[in-house]
Image (tube, grey):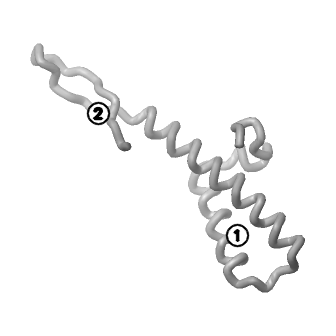
Amino acid sequence: MAKNSIPTDIAKLSFEDALEQLEEIVRELEEGSGKLDESIKAFERGAHLKYHCEIKLKEAQNRVEKVVLNDGGEDGLEALNLD
């Protein structure tokens, strides 16, 4: 799924808001009380929300840096590896 294939309304969401919506969709799908067409649409939206959350997390990971003391005794920045 390409980033530009995420619906505009989802692309505008913060990580927290997207995650909240995704959790709600999961709860609704687990109940299994909706019609098939509605469930399929909810699942598709959930897939977009999941991908959006993954992108947001990766962006945050790329921005997170930790301060380290380099060999010369000077403060430096080093990317924090969260993998």
Reading the image, the residue beneath label 2 is 66
Q: Is residue 54 left or right of residue 79?
A: right
Specify the quadrant that holds the N terminus: top right
Say which quadrant the C terminus sits in.
top left
Against 80, is 34 above or below? Answer: below
Which residue is tagged 1? 25
Quadrant hosting residue 41: bottom right
Q: Position of residue 32 (x, y in %)?
A: 75, 83
> Height in image: 35 above or below 44?
below
Determine the image quadrant of residue 64: top left
Which amino acid, mark 2?
Answer: Lys
Q: Secondary structure at mark 1?
A: helix
Identify the residue at image location x=70%, y=61%: 46
Between the residue at mark 1 and the residue at mark 2, the CA separation in whole angstroms equals: 36 Å
User: How far across and down, in percent of the image, does residue 34 sit?
Assistant: 82, 81
Residue 35 relative to residue 10: left or right: right
- Foreground tag (1 vs 2): 1
Q: At label 1, which amino acid type do we have?
A: Ile
Residue 3 drawn at (x, y percent): 70, 38
User: Considering only vertical position in the picture, is 65 above or below 82?
Assistant: above
Front residue of 39 and 61: 39
